[in-house]
Image (cartoon, rainbow, N blue to C red):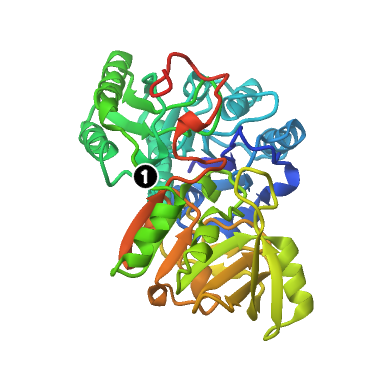
Amino acid sequence: MQTIAIGGIMHESNTFSDTPTDFDAFHTSLGDEIVDAWADTHHEMGGFIHGAAHHGNRRYPTLMASATPAGRVTDAAFDRLTDLLIQRLNVSAPKYDGLLLALHGAMVVESHPDGDGELLRRLRTVLPEELPIVVTLDHHANVSEAMVSHSTALVIYKTNPHTDQRQRGLQAAALLNRILCEGITPTQALSKPPMLLNIRYQNTSAEPLHSILNAAAELEARDDVLVANVAAGYPYADVPEAGPSFVVVTDDNLRLARREADRLSDMLWHVRGQLTLDLPDAAAAVRQAIHSEKHPVILVEMGDNIGGGSPGDSTVILAELLKQKAAGFVVVLCDAESVKTCLHTGVGENVALSVGGKTDTLHGEPIPIRGSIRLIHDGHFVETEPRHGGHKYHNQGLTTVIELASPCRALVVLTSKRQTPFSLHQLLSLGIQPQAMQIIVVKAAIAYRAAYEPIAGEIIEVDTPGLTAVNPQHFTYQEIRRPMFPLD
């Protein structure tokens, strides 16, 4: 029987954000706490746990730490988390035969643009050279040569929204078992076209990624290929590794790995001319939603994509909904200050607030609203279905629902913590029936689709300003490779 160590440190870092990610921003589990927190989730960690057991291996849980996307991880937080992981692996650990490691692939640290590559480098300096390390990465990973060279094999999510995380954990566990029991020799190659893939085109159920992932699946079905990875990349990190990546893993055949990684990369590069942007602004999108006969209309506020590191308090679409007197809408804003006011006022009472737009000057100004406090909630909810992120238990902090005096049936939900809109239970837990609304604003890009697409009458993607603006031309890049499509 083999012993498998499992662990992870995950963060997606928006380098255009001024909000640093410190140690306290991470949700951290140690030892058996990992099993208790993650075993029954749709996360890759759940796949690690059950995959090890399925192959008859003992598991040794070390550290699992993850934080909501925001700005760069501080050096102090990175050093502390890395040292904690190394301590668990190198000091207090029993003898183990391999490591399953969950990383994001787009973590940027204050002193290390390639945070994941630096983490793996540090592990390699203290762990036995021959120890196999199989790493799972998010589909938005900005894969680096360091990640490839310091890992034994990479396994990257195949879906966006990410509904296959548990399956990738199981795949990684099966691959590590083959390395240990069959003596295979994973050999991997990386290919990166000189481009940023706009977040709008990172839906794996649509082109251009749909065809490329089908080609990767056909490749992975071959006996001489172990894994065929496609990563769309994370365009909100101004780092040299930014952009799509293709990593093919073979059994001791570097030539084949390089050839097939380049072939997949070329498939994306050759269709770059089709990746154009023509999205409505907030005013046009709200007009279209008001006149739509298909409800609910989902307005996607792409400039305030919480899953991409934005603050979640943009008022750009809310301002237009009020200006155009839209009815039957629901907007969720992160505004802890206003939540405190509601808590002191009490349920059923009328309240006047100035909501949102308080984090920076990029996401609109605070908007005055009046209404009654319909509900105060602790912010906890549970998602049992496979959803982007793989989490089951969620906490958006103390939350209040304001029913506006005007327009009719309009709701503003105020949370104390940023919460990605990846689950309908964010609203259902508050007594809001999404299907009964006329307009729902989601602060996202692609990941909301797993939850909201099945109930949507119509989906309108909106070109709004912010830290996650859909058009990369809105940002000033200084560190990425140049020339780079579509910037050059």
Q: Residues within 10 Å of mark 1 (few under 14, many from 20)?
A: some
Task: From the viewer's perspective, tell me whether residue 61 is left or right of residue 185.
Answer: right
Q: Is residue 169 left or right of residue 334?
A: left
Residue 285 sits above or below residue 104 on the image: below
Tell me what residue is drawn at x 40 percent, y 77 percent: 436
Of 194 and 282, nearer the camera is 282
In the foreground, 262 or 452: 452
Q: Is residue 314 above or below residue 3?
A: below
Q: Secondary structure at mark 1?
A: loop
Indicate left or right for 267 with 417 as reference: left
Q: Residue at x 61, y 69 (%)?
A: 380
Horizontal placement of 304 versus 347: left or right? left
Whether residue 162 is visible, yes or no, is: no
- Residue sitting at the far right: 344
Q: Position of residue 61 (x, y in %)?
A: 60, 47
* Residue 418 image position (x, y, % from top left): 62, 56
Marker count (numbered) = 1
Residue sitting at the far bottom: 348
> Which residue is labeled 1 in the image?
279
The percent position of residue 300, horizontal first and vertical second, equals: 43, 54
Of residues 391 and 378, which is closer to you in this image? Answer: 378
Which residue does the image show at 69% across and 63% down from the upper left? 354
The kind of residue on which mark 1 rests is: Leu
Which percent across, then down, holds residue 420? Answer: 53, 56
Q: Quadrant of the C terminus?
A: top left
Question: Can the viewer see residue 226 in this picture?
Answer: yes
Q: Is residue 5 above or below residue 269?
A: below
